[in-house]
Image (spheres, grey):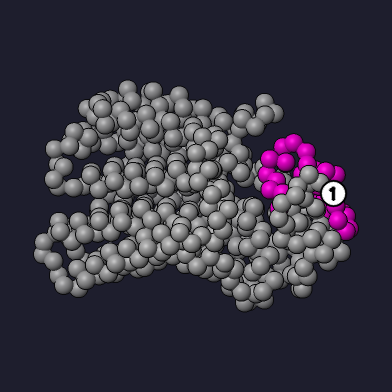
Amino acid sequence: MPSTTLAYRATIGLIWALALWHSWICRGLFIDGSAFLMNIVRYSSFFVFYLPRVYAMVAAQLPVMAGITLGVTDLHQLGQLLSLGLFALPTILYSLALMRARHDAVVLAIVITAIAVVFMTTSFFIVGEYNTAYGLTILIAVRLVTARRLTFADGLALLAAAAFSIRVYEVFIYLGPLLGAMTLWQIRRFKPRPIVPVLLHLGAVACFVAAAVVAVDSVLHPWSAEHLDETYVMALSFWQNLQFDLVFIPVATVAVWALVRPEQLRTVRPYLWAAVWVVLLALSPLLAFTDTQLRPLARSHYVARTVCGLIIAAMVAFLWCYTARKLDQWRVRLALQDGGARRRVLVFACLILLAMVPSDIFLSLSWQSYLTSFRQTVTSHTGVVAFEDTPMAQWPEVLLVENWTLPLQGLILRSKRGDGIVAPPRTYTGWTPFPPDDPPHLGRFVWRD
């Protein structure tokens, strides 16, 4: 049975090891990430195209902008720096939440579960600002429920996090009010109420309200109405993410069991039912040998992002109920006061996180192979290269292809201006960032191995 200290330290070590590896193999260039890097190097400035998310965008691009400022011209290194910024931002937020939760096994288990169910099932599309939004929400909620009194330090940290949340992602349309209500509850539940900490907490409430207002405005006046409609439609397709399915089912099993028969959390029975799905999750990369799309898929991470916001909200609500004094007789809370039940919950959270690792490694290795094949294709050709004539059109590399990004990725992977540019498939009639036969000149920036 792991102690809370071992669990939080091991989890932090794991998520940082993965973040650094993902940065090293340039996983941040997946889909929109390649467009981000092209625009950053082309104009030598932050790529900010959507003001409701500007804080998350700028924060994630700090490492790559630092590299450009210091004179780095290797697109390979800049791709690694962009990936580092994209992965480090949510990883820092989850790490701070883990550190804050380390003294309570149940709260710590919720944070670890959020990493497994939400972050690791949607973060292949790491350029999505929702990764930061969900990590920030968990951090704020954990700081609120683990506080013992109103302090200046907690108030200042809360205000800073709340101010940052104003322009991160549209999910604060409902997460903002939820966190604001929790903050008001925080003020009400503690005595004494020093004036400065109270003012800082009230300032945080105002920021959460502002975040909700910005989110509402971004929905009413979206950057792209077509993209917003697509998001609504795609929200119902979360089940297409196999990783999400296989980790959500066991977590939901234990959660429902806890609500219906909380006293059985003191036994192993709920976890035995969930264990089958945990094993299937750990073995899911083996599905790749069946040569079908029933396997962990990188592109499926995008479709689960919306439902994960609701899961984060449910986790925050549970943390609130778990620590509310008026619910001290709640059956679930009483059951979790048992030392054995608390340990089992924590062990379960750690196991589902570990079960996510094989599929994450599988997808990362697939991306590394895809990028290597793409690079070899670009440097061994000149002019426009037909997609159908490249290894990326073959199985399984084709599973990582997003048609409109093919010219972008080819442009970034070139060693010199005359190297090839891969055109989208002949059947593709959608938007492309530039004509494949007339790519933009990136000046001194080239990819070097």
Q: Is residue 433 visible?
A: yes
Q: Quadrant of the N terminus?
A: top left
Q: Which residues are magenta?
A: 376-404
Front one among 27 and 4: 27
Q: As displayed, is residue 188 above or below residue 306?
A: below
Q: Residue at x 44, y 65 (%)?
A: 167
Which quadrant would residue 252 be assigned to in this image? top left
User: In screen coordinates, is 79 left or right of 232?
Assistant: right
Q: Is residue 65 magenta?
A: no
Q: Residue at x 11, y 61 (%)?
A: 191
Density class for disc 1 (Cα within 10 Å; few <14, some 14-19, many ≥20) is: some
**Residue 284 percent across, percent down from the top left:** 57, 31
> What residue is pinned by disc 1?
386
**Residue 195 percent across, percent down from the top left:** 16, 72
**Residue 87 percent across, percent down from the top left:** 53, 56
Q: Residue at x 60, y 63 (%)?
A: 81
Q: Quadrant of the C terminus?
A: bottom right
**Residue 164 percent across, percent down from the top left:** 40, 66
User: In screen coordinates, is 190 left or right of 238?
Assistant: left
